[in-house]
Image (tube, rainbow, N blue to C red):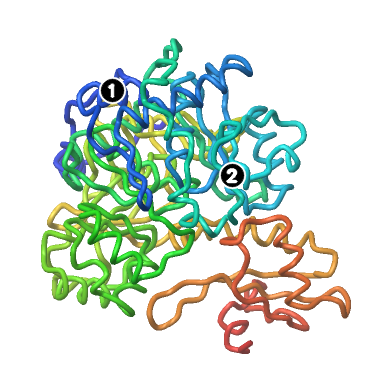
Amino acid sequence: MDELEVTDKALEAHRLLNRTTAPYPGQASVSELFEQCVARFSDSVAVVHGSRRLTYRELNALANRIAARLLAHGSCEGRIVGVCARRSPELIASLLAVLKCGGAYLPVDATWPDDRLAALFEQAQCTVALGDAAANLSARLPGVTTVPIEEAGSVENTASIEDTASIEDTASIENADAADDPGNPAATTSAEAIAYVNFTSGSTGRPKAVPIQHRAIARLVFRARYTTLDESSVLLQLAPVTFDAATFEIWGALLHGGTCVLYPSAFVRFSELQRVLEQEKVTDIFLTTALFNSILDEAPQTLDSVGRILTGGEAHSLRHIARALDRYGPDRLTSVYGPTECTTFATYHPVRALRADENALPIGVPIQNTRAYVVEAGRLCEPGETGEVLLAGPGLSPGYLASPEATAHSFATVRLGGVIERVYRTGDRAYLRDDGVLVFQGRLDDQVKINGYRIELGEVAHHLDACPAVKQSHVLVTEDPTGQKKLVAFVVPEHEGCTPAAVRGYLAGRLPGYMIPGEIRIRDGFPLSATGKVDRAALLAAGP
């Protein structure tokens, strides 16, 4: 256990920062909380997908039918179950089905390479999966038992992954009367059990599996300080289900009796997004920083009808924030920050105005039942001093699956002012401003966030270096004048067959699309600085 040095000034500042305790149902599982909503709001609309609308009763019946099918393949209690499906009511019901059976869901994307899918399932010791027809998991993962989400004789889900809207009017399994409900499974689940697992990029080339407990989800969405969540809430489900923002979008609605509106297409079109937001009277939307900036640049009217706009995932452009304030006014925009290991959001900052001396938008203060500490060299920092952000509270993951070394590196127990805290070391640097908010100051390592996805440059470099056509590689992040970030890979070829297309094709078989560099530049060699390191500025200055 680390004993942190503290001063009275530092301790008082952090005490004020961390007055976040609020009552929440920390002893109930997500499935219990959802079933309570079914009892209270049975005829209220739970899920919307195009013209399809399912009430809480219908969604619960659909989830129970899928759960029965899953249980027919054996008990799921304490097991991790893969879920691979397009955005649809069946996807949401599948997540619920796994939780109802006492399992934890592992969401994966059908567009990921087969080798990556197999590696993730093996790492999570996942031997059972729910999949729709488009996922074709039986052929792709022969060692995994695949349980079809669709019932025999129901919808023929032959549309492409991109064409989710094309099946929205076809008959599917929720068309069975809600009375055709086998009932809630008898499985019991504790609040400490794992509810889901997300994978994040790992610096060694091996992704890290982050398990999240039921209690952590409840901590995220109950008594929320960053927005208002209740039965009148209408949340847009826009993020890939493999991205932890989906935790807020789905459970923020379905654990309060609100409505979860599924964006009907695989790719965002601003005109369609505006139509959905207006038509469904969406109250809350989460947007990654990059998407938020693009909307402001190209179609700011898209968000005019939304009551609360949450945005985060990367450092914000003050120019875009200023434009958003001018367009949408104060009290509608909130910046949110948080690593996957702390269950989606850890801090929030309502953007009401920009200070004249502001050079970075604050990440704000901790959300409910979350604590943040700024620490440097074993000492709790006083206001104005920059250090690493440590997070604590019931939102923390219990640690990485099957990775004790990574867990020991990122999670620790500290004592400060007589209080013992289990903390997550974020690797982010910040300072506590004079008005009591945290201001982000960059990373301790080379981990970056692009379009909301956390990426270790080392993992991308690992796969580049493994490419037979590549002799050396180096990966950088560039930023255009609008603040848009992208990965750029510099490659020294092993032979003449090393072309950008060949390298990109190699990576496509091993990495998801968001981790493949947007540019691959061929170089004869890498310029070095005086210290013998790759001169990044010189690399970029050489042009394409």
- Which image quarter: residue 159? bottom right
| Residue drawn where x is 23% and y is 39% of the image | 258
Within-10-Å neighbours for mark 2: few <14, some 14–19, many 20+: some
Q: Tag 1, which secondary structure?
A: loop
Residue 467 in the image: x percent, y percent? 80, 63
Residue bearing the label numbered 1: 26
| Residue nearest the observer in this picture, 544 or 72 | 72
| Residue nearest the observer in this picture, 447 or 435 | 447
Amino acid type of the residue tagged 1 in the rendering: Gly
Q: Tag 2, which secondary structure?
A: loop
Q: Quadrant of the C terminus?
A: bottom right
| Residue drawn where x is 35% and y is 53% of the image | 387
| Residue drawn where x is 38% and y is 40% of the image | 342
Q: Is residue 494 left or right of residue 263?
A: right
Looking at the image, is 109 positioned above or below residue 129? below
Amino acid type of the residue tagged 2 in the rendering: Glu
Residue 296 in the image: x percent, y percent? 29, 75
Within-10-Å neighbours for mark 1: few <14, some 14–19, many 20+: some
Residue bearing the label numbered 2: 156
Residue 516 in the image: x percent, y percent? 63, 65
Q: Quadrant of the N terminus?
A: top left
Q: Which mark is residue 394?
A: none
| Residue drawn where x is 35% and y is 70% of the image | 270
Residue 394 in the image: x percent, y percent? 33, 29
